[in-house]
Image: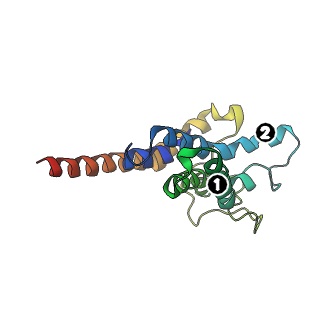
Amino acid sequence: MTHAVVPLAFAAAAGRGTISPKLAAAGAVLAMLPDADVIGFRLGIDYADTWGHRGATHALAFSLLVAGVIAAIWREARSIGAYAFLAVAMASHGLLDALTNGGLGPALFWPFSDARVFAPVTPIRVSPIGAGFFSARGAATMASEAVLVWLPCFALAVAGWLIRNRSRSALIG
């Protein structure tokens, strides 16, 4: 769920007049979508394979492609701003995963490279997959995400709201 917080924070900061609630919801779904690759485990796809967990679905190019397909079929996503929002929303997943401290890094540069990469700093605890999430390790992960993702996203949303309302007050007053 933490991945959904990023586009929702940007949408809240920008305001409904810039990013509609439908577009914000689509961004939240796209931000979580790359982890649907875990179904590959049941299909015999190895974690380290191109289509394994944190593989091609976590790539920046994949985000551009998926946002493009959505823009082609959904009228609300056809502006350059809406397309960019959706692409960035989905790309944020791989970028956040690159900040985690375990597992394989995401294949951010697929299809040009299958290399799994991490950021130079990895302050976010990696989340356990599956039922392991409901453990002490999962709770520690949530605490890490609360401080390093949720709190900055909340600050961004509030800052955007304050800036919009201050500007509105200046126009009225």
- Determine if residue 11 is in view: yes
In the foreground, 12 or 6: 12
User: Which is closer to the viewer, label 1 or label 2?
Assistant: 1
Q: Secondary structure at mark 2?
A: helix
Residue furthest toward the right?
44
From the image, tell me which residue sits under label 1.
68
State whether residue 143 appears in this view. no
Mark 2 neighbour class, 10 Å CA radius: few under 14, some 14 to 19, many 20 or more? few
Task: Name the side, left or right, on which 67 lies relative to 12.
Answer: right
Residue at x 68%, y 34% (from the top left corner): 132
Q: Residue furthest left?
A: 173
Residue located farthest toward the front when viewing the structure as drawn: 75
Q: Earlier in the sequence, mark 1 or mark 2?
A: 2
Report how many numbered discs are placed on residues in the image. 2
Spot occupied by residue 7 in the image (x, y as percentages of width and height)? 50, 47
Where residue 19 appears, as percent x and y from the top left, is: 44, 46
| Image quadrant containing the N terminus | top right
Location of residue 112 (image quadrant): bottom right
Which residue was labeled with disc 2? Answer: 39
Q: Position of residue 118 (x, y in %)?
A: 64, 62
Q: Is residue 140 left or right of residue 171?
A: right
Which is nearer the eye, 99 or 113? 113
Q: Amino acid at mark 1?
A: Gly
Q: CA distance from mark 1 to mark 2?
A: 24 Å
Q: Which mark is residue 49?
A: none
